[in-house]
Amino acid sequence: FQFKEICTVQHSVSNVIPWINLVQQYANISFLNDCISICRVIRNFGLCLGVAYSKESKVCFIGVLGNNDDEVYLNEGYHFLTLKDCSKDRENERADNDQPELHVLPFLDEVCQLEFYKPLFLTGWSVIIEIRNIATLQECLTNCA
């Protein structure tokens, strides 16, 4: 079981990204977080500085540092994000949690990985609303979807 990480990213507002080469394309990437995770894994080897991602196309490009002649022109629908820093997410609060569980959520047509926290109060979280008379986990999750 690995701790998830929180990564700080910088979103570029321009569609021209200087000093960058796009070196690898990944297809069928449904979520920006998945694209960032690919970059995160190879970042320590100098193989990723940022990502160009399109939710519509489900495509993730890995960007590396180029030279002063290099620049990337992003097509419409693409966003470029630079990975700044990453840290383990709530490492102390998660230390005693059980392994995450997979749950089928038919109403979303998804299988989700859920992690149940042992501590009742978590840093950075607050209760938005309390929903009463919930009998099952599925019913609880339906209220969040």
Image (spheres, grey):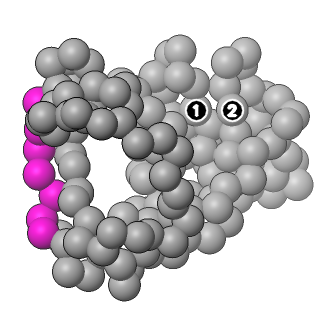
Please tell me whether residue 123 is drawn above or below residue 128 in the rendered image: below
Along the viewing direction, whichever of 84 and 122 lies nearer the viewer: 122
For badge 1, the amino acid type reads Tyr
Question: Image point 20% across, 28% down: which residue?
Answer: 139
**Residue 22 appears at what percent x and percent y?**
62, 41
Local secondary structure at mark 2: strand
Q: How many labels does the image show?
A: 2
- Using the numbered discs, state the Cα–Cα distance from disc 2 to disc 1 in whole angstroms: 5 Å
**Residue 126 appears at what percent x and percent y?**
52, 57
Q: How crowded is mark 2: few (under 14 residues within 10 Å), some or many (20 or more)?
A: some
The part of the chain drawn in magenta is 98-104
**Residue 65 appears at what percent x and percent y?**
70, 58
Residue at numbered disc 2: 79
Q: Is residue 101 magenta?
A: yes
Question: Image point 20% across, 80% down: which residue?
Answer: 96
> Could you tell me if the residues under marks 2 and 1 are in contact, i.e. CB atoms within 8 Å?
yes
Along the viewing direction, whichever of 129 and 114 lies nearer the viewer: 129
Quadrant of the rendered structure where residue 29 is? top left
Residue at numbered disc 1: 53
Residue 142's disc is: none
Please tell me whether residue 93 is drawn above or below residue 10 in the rendered image: below
Q: Quadrant of the N terminus?
A: bottom left
Asked whether the viewer can see residue 9, the reply is yes
Q: Residues within 10 Å of mark 1 (few under 14, many from 20)?
A: many
Please tell me whether residue 90 is drawn above or below residue 20 in the rendered image: below
